[in-house]
Amino acid sequence: MTDLQEIKNRLDLVDVVQDYGVQLRKSGRNYAGFCPFHPNTRTPAFYIFPESQTWRCFGACADGGDVFSFVMKKNGWDFKETLADLAKRAGVELADARPKDAAREAAEDRQAALLDTAALYYHQLLLHAPQAEAARRYVADRALTDETVAAYRLGFALDSWDAAKTHFTAQGYSEAELLAAGLLTEHEERHTRYDRFRGRLMIPIRDLDGRVVGFGARTLDPDGVPKYLNSPQTALFDKGHLIFGLDMAKRHIRDKHEVVLVEGYLDVMTAWQHGFRNVVAQMGTSLTEAQLRLLQKQSKRFVLALDPDAAGAKATLRSLQLARETLDRDLDVRFNARGLVQLEGRLKADIRIVTLPEGQDPDKLIRTDPAAWPRLLAEARPVVDYVIGVVAAELAPGDAKGKSAAAAQVLPLINDIADPVERDHYLNKLGKTLGIEVAALRQAAERQRKDRPPGRGKGGQGRKGAGGQGSRGAGEQGSGGEREWSGQVPPEPEGPPDDFGPPTRGAISVGGSTIATRRLRHSPQLEANFLRQCLEHPGALSAVNYLLSRHKLPEVSAGDFARAEDKALLTEIAQRATLPTVATIAELCDSLDSALAQRVKVLAATPPQPGTKLERLPDSLALSVLDWRLEKIREHNTIFKQLHPAGGPTDSADELTLSYLEQVRQMKRINHARDAMSATGRRRAAEGKTKN
């Protein structure tokens, strides 16, 4: 039995849901209540089915799952956090299936302990050492309170070549360990080792779990360089994968549904002190994709509060020229507009930009006028909107060549927008701003798309293998119709007879009778095959998403999968596909927790579905996604009709009815797309035979 199965066996979903404050009432063998995930106060839309230990919302969410899915959705947690929480609640000791390097893990644990001790050492020096008087004055001048100093454990490094070395070697640490932790540095020629941080204000940098992994050290000398000296790359410190202050801010980010990114450590501390606790700082000059993915687990709305020099016109225009497909490499500017737009599409995020007034930074602005900070954030604009304003401000009136050059700079950003409606909005906005006919901009945008290198698609995602729609075998279904509302639950769309076979073992009790979940006969296998193919072929996910977007359907998301570990695995697959070097299955397993690693091994060992040619893989997988979406909608609607038979809700504006009708419309859209994909595949197959 796996850890997940053991946890589910020990926990009762009803108890877990009620522990989160959801009021439930008995309804036959099931439980009903108001949905905790959306405003729902009129008609109970949230149901729990104890026999299957699943939940489902029949209202605006139209979502469902098991105990893992509920806790993940309720807390905004990722799979790893949820697994640890539910294991603790169930009293299950998690096994680690990954092969362990005991020596490496022991060394990392010892390094973490050393860094934590170093943070305490530097903190005590700041509080009590006579040599730290200048540092204490600096902290006082920045108006940081004792509470803030203690919360961030600010410290001071003595202006000495060997004070830290002497202190820690006396405690039993070797010079090699101090060097590996970044506390010492070594002279390249003489090979002598000495304190890396000397005469500086020490700012501990912690990871998401609150462990000290390194330091940011600010000079106290007005002419000192560098202004900030960070720890070097170590086993624990990787600035491209760290966000300063996130360990303390993550709960507040979830509460606010927004994360604000600033550039300085002191900006974060001042914001925290004044009650703005969803503020964090990036580590380095460019925001990396790894950092955004880390933040995305807390919120999908990002506001970049940039200093004027970072977001000025020259830096913005330079970023358009230097933009790359991802942000996982540093650029020589701190604002990469095109990279942000591409990330926004890939991560389904809402990234906005706000520029501080000239001569201000967040620290100064918040200290002098705290009320101005929320007003400023409210002015944040989407990336493309912001860039259009910058480009227009640089343009001389009546300069035709300037307009052409400006359009050429901004159009790649617009082309990279994943959503067609948003893309069209910005084409119109750019045309109006520059005084250019939108038709001319569309022609220019189309030329740029044709000139792109092969294999590049929107958002930097590859299109290789996604050029055509594959054929569909037996069991194709036509488009469904939609009937007028008659005061009762409407029938499902008309179409060919159900081809999903007899009921399977899954069942749900409704009103004392049993509903067989017959329509989910194929979905588990289709979902598993999809993930298996994406693990074997990293470009498959982006190719399938491209096909779905062409037919105006949502891209594959965590919500498409029933198993909680599969939801989490999709995120890992998407991230893996963006890396410059694709990790092997074994390497991927080594980077995952035991539950996900075990799932990957099971999927990798499962034979692929027969008869699928590699060149038709994106088409086949896209159709399989549509198949399992249809299955799930049919199951959803079947249960709904038995919960609310004729004579049930009759208000056409009732939330449950509106949700049901939306499900009907989704079936119609999916069937239409399936027909289009299948027809295209058959035509291409016929054309191929004719040519041969």
Image (cartoon, rainbow, N blue to C red):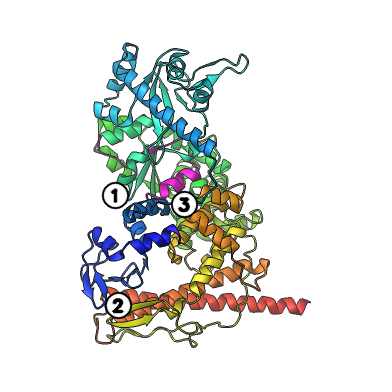
Which residue is under mark 2? 657
Instruction: Between residue 498 and residue 539, name the one nearer to us.
Output: 498
Which residue is under mark 1? 255
What amino acid is found at the position of numbered circle 3 in the picture? Glu
* Secondary element at image label 3: helix
Contact between marks 3 and 1 (CB within 8 A): the answer is no
* Residue 287 magenta: yes
Q: CA distance from mark 1 to mark 2?
A: 31 Å
Q: CA distance from mark 3 to mark 1?
A: 21 Å
Q: Residues within 10 Å of mark 1 (few under 14, many from 20)?
A: some
Instruction: Between residue 550 and residue 406, name the one nearer to us.
Output: 550
Query: Quadrant where the N terminus lies?
Result: bottom left
The residue shown at (27%, 85%) is 487
Which residue is under mark 3? 344
Mark nearer the N terminus (3 vs 1): 1
Magenta span: 274-300
Q: Comparing marks 3 and 2, which lies closer to the viewer? A: 2
